[in-house]
Amino acid sequence: MSVKRYEKNPAVRRATRVRARVKASGRLRLSVFRSSRHIYAQVIDDAAGTTLVTASSVEGDIKGAGNRETAGKVGKLLGERAKKAGIKEVAFDRGRFPYHGRVQALAEAVREAGLKF
């Protein structure tokens, strides 16, 4: 795919726009990626360029098909790990995905676990 064609892709433009706003907030970033079968989430420190906490539906104790329940479990696990690491506030980066369905379920579970965004 050529660079121009890639940059004109609506999903890429949306992800770039969302990510720019999140990075401008100066907080740690909670990034979500959703595939057709799994959901992945991680807390990233953009200033240092490191990933601090991760959770996904591929992990052994969660292992499940891609649905809202599984996304909720991933969110709860990520929230618990983040609290254990001393993280209290993050900025939610949904990337190119709309805020509904599995992405929304993950976000609500993270909030219930005690993270603020």
Image (tube, rainbow, N blue to C red):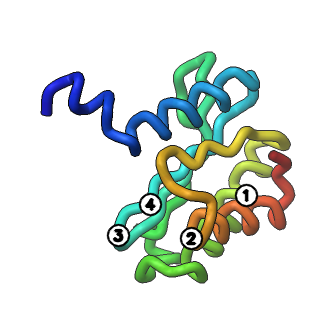
How far, Cα to Cα, is label 3 from label 4?
A: 7 Å
Label 1 and label 2: CA atoms lie apart by: 16 Å
Q: Is residue 42 visible?
A: no
The percent position of residue 37, horizontal first and vertical second, equals 36, 73
Report the Cα–Cα distance between label 1 and label 4: 18 Å
Q: Nearer the viewer, mark 1 or mark 4?
A: 4
What's under tag 3, amino acid-wise?
Ser
Estimate the x, y position of residue 21 in percent, counting from the top left: 66, 28
Corner quadrant of residue 74: bottom right
Near-viewer residue (108 or 50):
108
User: To which residue does mark 2 refer?
Assistant: 102
Q: Are marks 3 and 4 in contact (CB under 8 Å)?
A: no
Task: Give the Cα separation between the discs numbered 3 and 1.
Answer: 23 Å
Under mark 2, the amino acid is Arg
Q: Are marks 2 and 4 in contact (CB under 8 Å)?
A: yes
Residue depicted at 54% across the width and 28% down the height: 50
Q: Is residue 21 above or below residue 111?
A: above
Secondary structure type for disc 2: helix
Q: Mark 1 = which residue?
A: 79
Say if 4 sits above or below 80 in the image: above
